[in-house]
Amino acid sequence: MTTPALILLDFINEIVDDNGKFAGKGYPAFLKAHDVINNVNAAINKARKKNIPIIFVRVGFSPDYREWPEMSPLFGAAKKYSALQLGTWATEVHSSINMIDTDFLITKHRVSAFYATSLEVILKTLKIDTIILGGVATDLVVQSTARDAHDRDYRVIALEDLCGAGSEEDHKNALRTLAKIAIISKSAEVPELN
């Protein structure tokens, strides 16, 4: 018997909303085309019925950008454009996602949900051995978190219908790579949620 947690990565306004500063990267369009938000909410409802912990992870930086990695090709321009600022609409979980107060919310300052966060402490405290992942982007936070989880000896399930990327190609390439370290599935097919 497994003890799973549903981990939802970077479903924040700046990335998934049409008005977010990363909308031009294609994430909102991908999510709409694949009905990802509805799939996420359906998975959340199933997880709640089974008392599976739900952990939201968001990326963000303090208003003075003290944690900002200036040399990062991914985050380097965040300060210049006042992007991903904590305490603002930008880093709130998108309002269309069914997050409640009893869900966990972790803030990260890099790509992986494990790097310099409390995620592993929470997982160990809850005695979690199986991580079910969904997030944006498949080729960034999902892949990075899955790799870190794999190397920490968790069983990793990546739900392709709960993931989004900037393009179909990025999504499919990431899933192909993820299949080497994780189980790739759809939310309707995962025994832990059904």
Image (spheres, grey):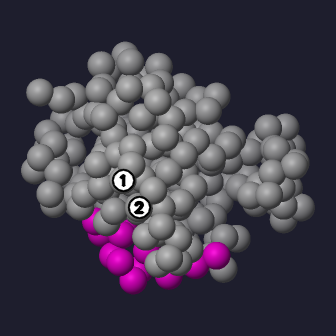
Describe residue 55's horizontal placement relative to residue 183 as left or right: right
Describe residue 15's horizontal placement relative to residue 128 as left or right: right
Q: Secondary structure at mark 2?
A: helix
Marks 1/2: CA–CA distance: 6 Å
The amino acid type of the residue labelled 2 equals Leu
**Farthest top residue?**
125
Describe residue 187's horizontal placement relative to residue 71 as left or right: left
The residue pinned by badge 2 equals 175
Q: Position of residue 94 (x, y in %)?
A: 49, 61
At x 47% / y 19%, what residue is drawn? 121
Q: Nearer the viewer, residue 97 or 117?
A: 117
Specify start and end residues of the magenta stretch as a single range: 25-39
For the N terminus, give its image quadrant: top left
Q: Position of residue 181 (x, y in %)?
A: 39, 44
Q: Position of residue 87 (x, y in %)?
A: 68, 47
Describe residue 41's horizontal placement relative to residue 66 as left or right: left
- For the residues bearing labels 1 and 2, Cβ distance under 8 angstroms: yes
Q: Nearer the viewer, residue 180 or 51?
A: 180
**94 inside magenta stretch:** no
Would you say residue 96 is visible in this rendering? no
**Displayed quadrant of residue 55:** top left
**Displayed quadrant of residue 160:** bottom left
Q: Position of residue 126 (x, y in %)?
A: 32, 21
At x 21% / y 52%, what residue is drawn? 45
- Asked if 122 appears above or below 15 in the picture, the reply is above
- Asked if 153 appears above or below 65 in the picture, the reply is above
The residue pinned by badge 1 equals 179
Crowdedness near tag 1: few (<14), some (14–19) or many (≥20) residues, C-alpha within 10 Å: some
Q: Nearer the viewer, residue 21 or 110?
A: 110
Would you say residue 109 is visible in this rendering? yes
The amino acid type of the residue labelled 1 equals Ala
- Asked if 170 appears above or below 51 in the picture, the reply is below
